[in-house]
Amino acid sequence: MNTSDPKATPMRKLILAGAAVLALASSRAFAADVPVKAAPVVAPVPVFSWTGCYLGIEGGGAWGHSQHIGAADDVFEDDKLVTQFSGVPISDSFRVSGGLVGGTLGCNFQVGKVVVGAEGDGSWVSKKGSGPEVQVPEDDSSPRFIGTTGWTDSTKERWLATFRGRAGWTFSPQWLVFVTGGFAVAGMEAIVNEVPEGLAFTDRKTQFGWTVGGGIEWAFLANWSFKVEYLYVRLEDAVFFQNACGGSQLTVPCTMPPAPGPRFVPLDDHIVRAGLNFHFWTPVPAAPAAPVAVKY
C-alpha cells in the first residue's frame, strides 16, 4: 500500500480500528470461559458461652463455731415462768474445723455478659470440735449457763449438701465472677462426754439451714473450667437428745447416771474450696456458609 497516497490514510485507520475491536472481543470471550476463583472465606472465631450444664468435683477446708444450747421445757407456776431452760447456753461457743470433698452438678444460661444458673453439691465433711460445759447459776452480774461441771460437748459435721442459685458477670469471655445463695442441709452428730464417769452420749440429726457466698471461675478450655469459691453456711433448729430426759430436766427424772438434756446445736460454716467442672452440654455454634464461585 502506498502510504504517501493521501487517499490511503482513511483506509489505514479503518483497518487498525477493526483489528483493535477484534482483539478486545477475543480477550473478553476467553475471560468468560475461565472461572473466577472466589476469595477465601475465613470462618468466624467461635465466642465462648457459659450456657450449658456441667459436672465436677470440689474440695477444700471449713472452719467455724458451734455451741450447745438448752432446749428442755421451761418451768411455769400459775402461768408464770419460774425457770427457763430453752435458749439458755449449756456450753460456751467453741471452734470447729476440718476438710470436705465432693461433687457438683449445675447449669448456666448466659445473656450478654450476665450468667444465671442453679447448682447443687454434696460433700463428705470431717469437721469437728469440742468445749466444756459451763454451770453458772442465775445471777444479776453474769450470764446464766445450765451445763454440768466436768462434762464436755462436741459437734461433728459428717456430710453437707447445698442447693443454690448463681448470678454472675463475665468481665472477659472466659472469666466469670458470681454470687450464690440458697438452701443447705447437713448430717450432724452431737456428743456429750461425762468425763468423771467415762461415759459418752451420742445423737445424730439432719439439720437444715441456708448459705450465701461468691467466687470466680475460669474456663481454661472449651469444656473445662476451674473455680474458687467461699460459702457461709448456717445450720440450726434441730433438737438433739430430745427424749433423753423425757422432754424436761425437772418434771421427769433422767436415768442414773444422768443423761444429757435436750439441746440445740447450731453450727456456723466458713468454707473455702476449689472445683474442677466438665461442661458436658453446650450449644454448638452454626457452621459458616460455603463459598460460592461466580462467573462473569
Image (cartoon, helix red, strand yellow):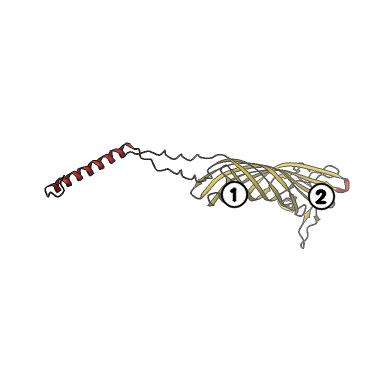
**In the image, 192: left or right of 44?**
right
Question: On the image, numbered disc 1 is attached to which residue?
Answer: 217
Residue 242 is situated, as x and y percent measured from the top left of the image, at 74, 43
Query: Of the numbered discs in the image, which one, if any, rests on residue 152?
Result: 2
**In the image, 136: left or right of 274?**
right
Residue 120 is situated, as x and y percent measured from the top left of the image, at 61, 42
- The earlier-in-sequence mark between 1 and 2 is 2
Whether residue 208 can be seen here = yes
Q: Give the residue type at disc 2.
A: Thr
Identify which residue, 266 or 55, lies in the foreground: 55
Q: Give the residue type at disc 1.
A: Glu
Q: Secondary structure at mark 2?
A: strand
**Badge 2: residue crowd in 10 Å (few <14, some 14–19, many ≥20):** many
Residue 253 location, quadrant: top right
**Badge 1: residue crowd in 10 Å (few <14, some 14–19, many ≥20):** many
Residue 93 location, quadrant: bottom right
Residue 129 is situated, as x and y percent measured from the top left of the image, at 77, 50
Q: Residue at x 72, y 47 (%)?
A: 99
Disc 1/disc 2 C-alpha distance (Å) = 42 Å
